[in-house]
Amino acid sequence: MNHYLADVLIVEDDAHLRAFFENALTRAGYLVMAVSDTPEAQEILASHTVRVVLLDKELPSMSGLTLLRSLRDGGNDAPVVVVTGDQNEEQRSMGLSLGATCYLLKPVNLGNLLTAVRSCLVGPRSERTAEYRPLLAFDFGAGEVPARQHVNPDGGIGGWVAETADVEDGCVLAPGARVFGNARVFGNAMVLGTASVCDFARVRDGAIVTDSALVVESADVEGAVVSGEARISGKAFVGATARVENRSQVTGDARVLKGAVLLGETVVGGREWVSGVTLGADFSGSEDLDDDLTPAAS
């Protein structure tokens, strides 16, 4: 009997990328399963129903395209999104001819990933005109200002957006989320839970801000996941595939970049530059920095 297992099966041998995809897609509301190689994927796909396969083209045991061919030969028509660093057009055409739904090039833009998965699960976006929401008075905490409710890509009514702020079509705003001041949310980003984006902050390119997290002042979150009670402030930048969780803070001119994970009550501030490391509750900006933490460029 073929049992239902997941919305998305991730097949990716890069441990960091696999964990980031799993975290981001789970935060976006999908039921996710992640494995590192072909045999595990084949075992799952033989006995369970998976709605979308996110498939790395280069895997340790066999090419992702070989797995794709075996799926199609066996009658499995689940949409397959191939992830690759190979820009060879001939290879891409081969994958599409074997039945791949689409290709995503590494480094993967999280916004493109979310769009691809969403399209596979719900089909092409309808041609209907999104429902117009009138401006109303809404209090974001400092008195009432003109604001409207955001219309999400599925037609559902989301959270409140001040008239001075901007949330682009295609972005998702949960009913409890708030965007105000001169903040901008664009590029298929998601503001979920009771998270807030305000002042001149930007959340973009598939970034997910969720739970009760805050992105304020002139902070910029690009393709990253910010969750829990995390706070991104000042002129801080949190870049693609980074995660800031729990009660962590990124402040000042700090940069948290590819592969970085901040947990607990980690504080990265000033002009610190963090990339490719996991920092727990014991780290603070006053401690010595190791070789993976370098001063931010001026």
Image (cartoon, grey):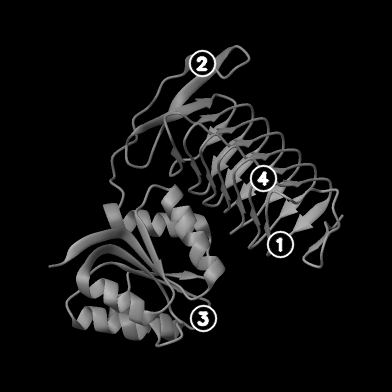
Earlier in the chain: of badge 3 and badge 4, it is 3
Q: Looking at the picture, which amino acid does disc 4 mark? A: Asp
Q: Looking at the picture, which amino acid does disc 1 mark? A: Ser
- Residue 286 image position (x, y, % from top left): 86, 48
- Residue 260 image position (x, y, % from top left): 66, 59
| Above or below: residue 118 compared with residue 73 | above
Q: Is residue 41 left or right of residue 184?
A: left
| Above or below: residue 16 compared with residue 213 | below
Earlier in the chain: of badge 2 and badge 3, it is 3
Disc 3 on helix, strand or loop? Answer: loop
Residues at marks 2 and 1 touching, judged by CB atoms closer than 8 Å: no
Q: Which residue is mark 3?
A: 86
User: How far, Cα to Cα, is label 3 from label 4?
Assistant: 29 Å
37 or 106: nearer the eye? 37
Residues at marks 4 and 1 touching, judged by CB atoms closer than 8 Å: no
Q: Looking at the rendering, in which quadrant would you find the C terminus?
A: bottom right
User: How far, Cα to Cα, is label 2 from label 3?
Assistant: 49 Å
Rate crowding at label 4 as few (under 14), some (14 to 19) or many (20 or more) other CA atoms within 10 Å.
many
User: How far, Cα to Cα, is label 2 from label 1?
Assistant: 39 Å
| Above or below: residue 210 compared with residue 157 | below
Q: Which residue is mark 2?
A: 138
